[in-house]
Image (cartoon, rainbow, N blue to C red):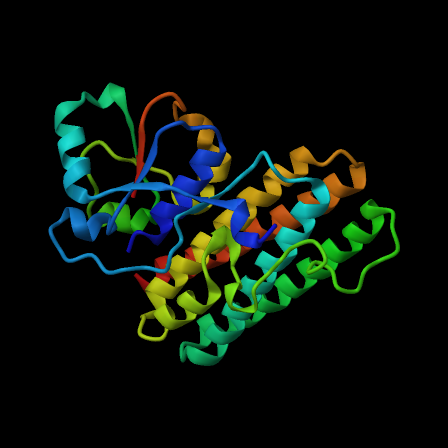
Amino acid sequence: MGISDYFKPVSSWSAEEVRTFLNEKGPEKYNLVDVRQPKEYGQSHLPGAQLIPLGELANRVKELDPNKPTIAY
Amino acid sequence: MGVRSRAAAAILSEAGFKKVYSMKGGINAWEGQVAEGVPEAGMAYFSSATQPEELLGLAWLLEDGSRKFYVEMASMLKDKEAVALFQELSKAEEKHQASLVNLYKELSGRPFDSEFPKNLFREEPSDERMEGGMHLREALQWAEKKAIKEILELSISLESNAYDLYLKMEHKMESLNAKKVFKVLSTEEKKHLERLASLLEKKL
């Protein structure tokens, strides 16, 4: 087995796809997570986004509902 | 932009989230700015396939890729704080590699193969990877023209993937000593993350 066989790609959406999705669904239907630093979040963030800096994500996964579609940026 | 969101998507996918999307280009793209490409980082582990011995070998190879990246960053960057941190990180990854080798010796129960971990994988020399699956070569090319902020973002992504991997390995391993080793490794990666994050906050 080669090392690349251990990886699989993650899906991504363009900003436009995200915009359309957020416009169509109510905030109770998805998780929207901002994984940047607090200072960056403070400067600007997407409406309704929840701040979980990337370094804390592995410990704070439980704050999110795994059954809802989740968008990270 | 967008490298951290891909690392996040990988972590969430592995945690069992069914539908996970990273937003291409991050906040810049949202605000209508042109998104820049980042090294192919959109990778997650196949968590099911791997046996403990393979995981050890895989972790060793990924640590090796990350270590080489940090060595390059320490010699490329001018910022003194960043240089000191990257030097320290590269030394820490070297120690992690030694811990992984020792654990492999203990768990495999066979005479040690000095080719470890190459005896476990068919690895192309040009296919060196860092934590999270990113290609070392691509990351180094990308980093050449980048500001310290973006390099720190990429490093945070590497460390987050490493941290996530070691947390999982701690649970997956059955031997108490293996659990202990992975606990130490994950604790250290967490500290690295905190250091990188606070330097990034400072440079923003």
Q: Identify the residue at horizontal 35%, vertical 44% (top origin).
A: A35
Residue B145 in the figure: left or right of residue B76: left
| Residue B117 image offset from top left, x and y in percent | 70, 58
Residue B199 in the figure: left or right of residue B175: left
Q: Identify the residue at horizontal 56%, vertical 64% (top origin).
A: B124
Q: Can you tell which quarter of the image residue B79 is in?
A: bottom left
Vertical comparison of B202 with B78: above or below = above
Q: Can you tell which quarter of the image residue B63 is in?
A: bottom right
Vertical comparison of B90 with B13: above or below = below
Question: Which is nearer the eye, B128 or A27?
Answer: B128
Question: Which is nearer the eye, B29 or B123?
Answer: B123
Vertical comparison of B127 with B106: above or below = below
* Residue B55 shows in the view: yes
Q: Can you tell which quarter of the image residue A18 is in?
A: top left
| Residue B130 image offset from top left, x and y in percent | 51, 59
Number of numbered labels in the structure image: 0
Q: Identify the residue at horizontal 56%, vertical 68% (top origin).
A: B125
Q: Identify the residue at horizontal 66%, vertical 33% (top origin).
A: B171
Residue B20 in the figure: left or right of residue B80: left
| Residue B160 image offset from top left, x and y in percent | 49, 48
Vertical comparison of B74 with B41: above or below = below
| Residue A71 image offset from top left, x and y in percent | 30, 35
* Residue B194 shows in the view: no
Quarter of the image with the C terminus of chain A in it: top left
Question: Which is nearer the eye, B26 or B51?
Answer: B51
